[in-house]
Image (tube, helix red, strand yellow):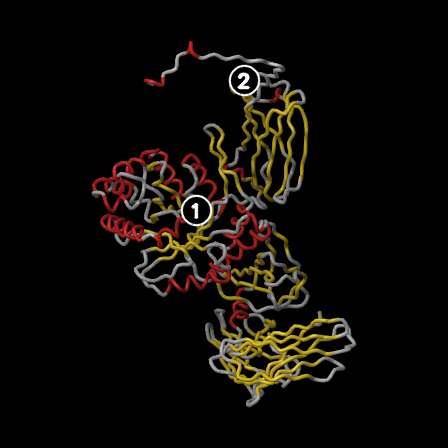
Amino acid sequence: MGARTLFDQDIYGSAWFDDVNISQVPEVLLSTNHPGNVFRRSDPLQLSVLVNDRFTDDLAAQLLITDAGGGLVYKHSAAMDMAEAHDLGPGLKELVVPMPDLAPGWYNAALVMSSRGHFVGQQNIQLVRLADDGTAYQPDPRFGVIATDLPFEGWSQLPDLLPILGAGRVKLAVWSALGDIEQVDPASFDNLLERLQKNGTTLTSCLVALPPDVAHNVGGPEWSRLLQSPPDSWRAELAYLVARHANHLDRWQFGDDRDAAEFVQNPDMRKVYDLLYAEFAKMVVSPDLAMPWPAWYDMNGNLPATVSLSVPPDVLPSQIPLYIQDIRGHEGHNLSLSLQLLDQRYGRQVQIRDLAQRVIYALAGGATRIDLPLPFTVSTAGNHVTPQPKELFLIMRTLLTQLAGATFHGKVPNSANVDAFLFDRNGHGLLVIWSSAQDAGVKQLALNLGEHPARIDLWGNVTPLVLPEKSGAISLDVGPMPFFLVDIDSTSAQMRSSVGVDKPLLESTFHPHVRRIHFTNPGKSTIAGMVKLVAPRGWLLTPSVFSFTLDPGEVFDHELTIEFPYNSYAGTKTITANFQIQSDHDTAFSVPILVNLGLSDVGLRTLALRDKGDLVVQQMISNYGEKSIDYSAFAVYPGQPRQERLVMQLGPGRTIIKLYRFTNVEFIPNAKVRSGLRELEGTRILNDEATVQ
């Protein structure tokens, strides 16, 4: 140390001890004999406790088990019976601790250790219990998980866990700041590839960072160093990795999905991608090399061969199909969706609901690669690296296994505020249903069920359904949380989803509206029948009854005239189509056809408030068109004279507020204010109503 050398004789000190308490804390390790701590429904629940201590006879343990909501479901305190423990060596013993029969779900088990009344440590372990005994499912290549943060020591359990999850793909970091996989443990990596291939799982090899050796050769860890360095300083390592595993690896990704913003903000990152793509093109034909791309950035210019689109949580689930359509406008490019999930701020239930809806909308939009975050955390104790499951493991498993191999066939029209997405898997229909509003409750749904219908929640719990007495209708408790309805008559459900009119918007003008009603025969045999249309009260449909005969795949398309009363309120209206079909077996069902009555270029919102004995009505009138409008506005309350206001020369894009005051009003229970607009020169009208607040 030169001038900083320390000499013992120059160091002095003193110490005073008032009260010394020496405790020997045992080393305790909790584990299970199941990969990822995932238990099937019939598996006995038990923990393995590894205790490393010189003296264990004084140890007591308290087992606390809590569920995903944080509620305590089990508590047991007792001295640890080391007589039944397995002696693994000096001071090292293994004890099996049984757990109670828990319902399917996610749990945290905490083992609190004490010695003669003194706390000496606590160990936690997370586990899930499945609702069934299924061990592995045919993986769907459309679904994958992102495991680029998983250390190499935890990779060995993936071939056992991914088939249970139902994932057909996984992303792993073969190049990272920790090293090149070919230098870390090539033999174990070879074994991993063989096990993944045996299970039908495809690996996407990710180059998330320069390995230390390559970073040393190019003079730094930044990717841009490759642009400034001789190719010989890094090409050999990449070529060896690609060539050695050419038979197992055909999908690659440059960069981490979390760094998607950097790839569009830093021009050098795109240059590095082009450089790497050129190297891959020398070794393989049409390389499948992905590059992260943020969803908020326009898809223009020279796109990568495969776009790994990073979709943040502020993109609504219903907007995801729009991004899929955008990339389809660029031919010759693959799309992989990397879905980011809501964080803990939104609460557990909202996170689960949002995840399910994102997967459903992505699949309905035609996504062929959907990547989800790995539903595990990683615990490290000594040399042990153990994946610990999150509750989202159960949710992802239900989504991936139920939708494996399923194709989207449209949304099935049903009662208002109910979304029903129809999927078909080899002729077996299933629906994903939830309420799009916060009006949870029992709803009457128009559905044709099979012989063994069942309801499956997102945790995998199956509830058989009783077939209704009335064909084509079933009562279900529907809320914001999505659920699966399996064993659906797929043919009739597909026919329901095809029923509609060509232009659902009806301009609120006082003259007949011509529309075309259409539906398709999705079955494999010819059908004949009749459909009777039932209009809202006061409306007139011409004609209201149609007879048809349709060959397989044939489309029924017929003209329909719609008329409605002058005082009809704007908003969503329902035309009910009652079908009677004769084919292999007679079928009857009803389909609601939703149309929207309003004006395409004028908006009206009404607010009615009490002001002591007066009633104040506010109208917000917006012009969404491209020219000025002239209307007469009015407001009416029962027992009060009608009040009118003029809306003159309201320019495009402008909004105006009109106020009405009704004095000394006798407030009638459940009475509503009627307001509206009438075109001064024309037949356009717009009626609205508002509840008094």
What is the count of numbered marks? Answer: 2
**Residue positioned most to the bottom:** 681
Pick whichever, 661 or 493, lies toward us.
Answer: 661
Find numbered disc 1 in the image and state the secondary structure of the residue it sits on.
Answer: strand
Q: Would residue 34 be found to the left or right of residue 177 on screen?
A: right
Residue 146 is marked as 1
Where residue 76 sits, quadrant-wise, is top right
Q: Position of residue 45 (x, y in %)?
A: 60, 35
The N terminus - image quarter? top left
Q: Where is residue 315 in the image (x, y as percent from the top left)?
A: 48, 58
Pick whichever, 357 or 682, lies toward us.
Answer: 682
Q: Is residue 561 at least partly visible in the picture?
A: no
Q: Would residue 96 be found to the left or right of residue 408 on screen?
A: right
Where residue 415 sits, quadrant-wise, is bottom right
Residue drawn 66% across and 23% down?
Answer: 79
The kind of residue tagged 2 is Gly
The kind of residue tagged 1 is Ile
Q: Position of residue 230 (x, y in %)?
A: 20, 43
Residue 76 is marked as none
Q: Position of residue 283 (x, y in %)?
A: 24, 48
Question: Which residue was labeled with disc 2?
Answer: 91
Find numbered disc 2 in the image and state the secondary structure of the residue it sits on.
Answer: loop
Q: In the rendered view, would you say 54 is above or below 344? A: above
Q: Is residue 52 at least partly visible in the picture?
A: yes
Pick whichever, 164 or 354, lies toward us.
Answer: 354
N-term-proximal mark, 2 vs 1: 2
Q: Between marks 2 and 1, how big is the CA–CA gap?
A: 40 Å
Q: In the rendered view, would you say 402 is above or below 42? A: below
**Residue positioned most to the top:** 9
